[in-house]
């Protein structure tokens, strides 16, 4: 953050300027400058192009933000733009691999939709980034599906997370995300569907709460989605689409929860463990680093620091 040479006594004249600052502050956690279109997309208030233009001019005139070509930042640091562009280029290069792996995942039994999540869904990757996948399964078969995918990764990919990180599953009867906050809203709205077009739109409809955070957002493009081999899946699913399959699904869920508790339970409070390692028949989440909490905490720190530096008070953001 900039260190002012004197005490600022500035007031935010428009609510939109306030909202744009909060958007920049969230992405500043990732040191990620934004374009005007991105600022509008992630703005917590409905707004038009002309309104955004005026608000950005106001913030630039007050010295609260900086502009480098088409990017806006809280820092007078062109290197952040260079870093972003390099990450955007790498994400574009790895998208071909991401779509190929998505197609492979779509062939597994009971997979109904595959979406890209994590950094690639934001259009940015660095050398340490994994390819993260958000997977929707048939009801009652989530844990069988998860176990098939985990075993495939361990046996054939030597447990590599680089191109095959499957850490979030839900089923088609429970598409609404239960933890509804700024972090999950951004993760939901940026998902890139690669398989299961209809299921993706059903997911979007089931999560209309996201519009409370991002009223200017819209579903992703789906024209590039390709369908898998329905005949092969139908045959393999018949083997487990019965009482035995339900029992196996329950067994895998219990086995996984036991393992997660052995490895991670002591590192988290019960409340945080239940969120980071969601273990229900209709949902599975495996996030040992618990980014949700750490990112939201850092975001609040950014807001407090900005308010102190510029002697302003931003309106309370949605949490």
Image: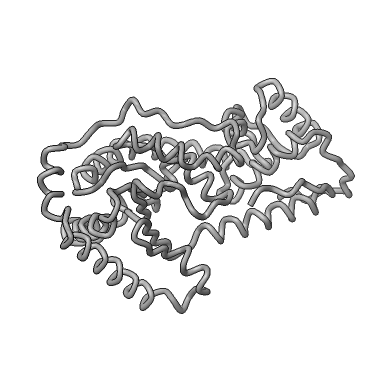
Place of residue 77 in the rendered image (x, y in percent of width and height, measured from the top left) = 64, 42
For the residue pair 244 and 136, the one nearer the viewer reads as 244
Q: Can residue 87 be seen in this view?
A: no
Horizontal side of 268 relative to 166 (left or right) equals right
Task: Write the residue at 68% across / 37% down.
Answer: 20
Image: 215 above or below 83: above
Q: Which residue lies furthest to the front in this view?
A: 243
Image: 133 above or below 33: below
User: What colour scheme governs how the chains and residues are painted in the rendered image of this protein?
Assistant: one colour
Place of residue 190 in the rendered image (x, y in percent of width and height, measured from the top left) = 47, 39
For the residue pair 199 and 2, the one nearer the viewer reads as 199
Place of residue 133 in the rendered image (x, y in percent of width and height, measured from the top left) = 34, 48
Task: Write the residue at 75% across / 32% down.
Answer: 60
Task: Write the residue at 43% across / 48% down.
Answer: 118
Q: Can residue 178 be seen in this view?
A: yes
Indicate the quadrant where residue 160 lies.
bottom left
Place of residue 257 in the rendered image (x, y in percent of width and height, measured from the top left) = 34, 71
Horizontal side of 252 relative to 306 (left or right) equals left
Task: Write the residue at 69% across / 36% down.
Answer: 66
Horizontal side of 135 relative to 10 (left or right) equals left
For the residue pair 125 and 155, the one nearer the viewer reads as 155
For the residue pair 186 and 121, the one nearer the viewer reads as 186
Image: 15 above or below 137: above
Q: Which residue lies furthest to the top in this view?
A: 50
């Amino acid at each position: 953050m900039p260190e002012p040479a004197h005490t600022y006594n500035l007031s935010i004249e428009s609510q939109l300027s306030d909202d744009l600052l909060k958007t920049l502050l969230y992405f500043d956690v990732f040191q990620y400058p934004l374009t005007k279109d991105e600022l509008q997309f992630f703005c917590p208030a409905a707004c038009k192009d002309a309104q955004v233009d005026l608000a950005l001019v106001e913030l630039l005139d007050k010295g609260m933000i900086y502009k480098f070509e088409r990017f806006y930042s809280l820092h007078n640091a062109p290197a952040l733009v260079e870093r972003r562009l390099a990450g955007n280029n790498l994400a574009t290069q790895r998208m071909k691999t991401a779509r190929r792996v998505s197609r492979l995942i779509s062939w597994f039994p009971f997979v109904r939709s595959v979406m890209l999540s994590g950094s690639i869904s934001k259009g940015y990757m660095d050398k340490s980034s994994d390819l993260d996948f958000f997977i929707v399964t048939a009801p009652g078969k989530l844990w069988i599906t998860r176990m098939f995918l985990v075993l495939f990764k361990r046996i054939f990919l030597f447990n590599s997370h680089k191109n095959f990180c499957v850490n979030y599953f839900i089923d088609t009867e429970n598409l609404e995300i239960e933890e509804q906050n700024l972090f999950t809203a951004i993760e939901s709205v940026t998902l890139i569907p690669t398989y299961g077009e209809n299921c993706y739109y059903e997911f979007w409809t089931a999560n209309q709460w996201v519009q409370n955070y991002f009223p200017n957002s819209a579903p992703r493009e789906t024209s590039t989605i390709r369908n898998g081999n329905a005949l092969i899946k139908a045959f393999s699913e018949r083997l487990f689409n019965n009482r035995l399959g339900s029992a196996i699904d329950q067994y895998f869920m219990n086995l996984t929860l036991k393992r997660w508790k052995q490895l991670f339970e002591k590192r988290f409070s019960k409340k945080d463990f239940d969120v980071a390692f969601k273990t229900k028949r209709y949902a599975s989440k495996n996030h040992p680093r618990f980014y949700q909490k750490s990112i939201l905490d850092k975001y609040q720190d950014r807001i407090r620091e900005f308010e102190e530096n510029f002697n302003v008070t931003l309106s309370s953001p949605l949490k």
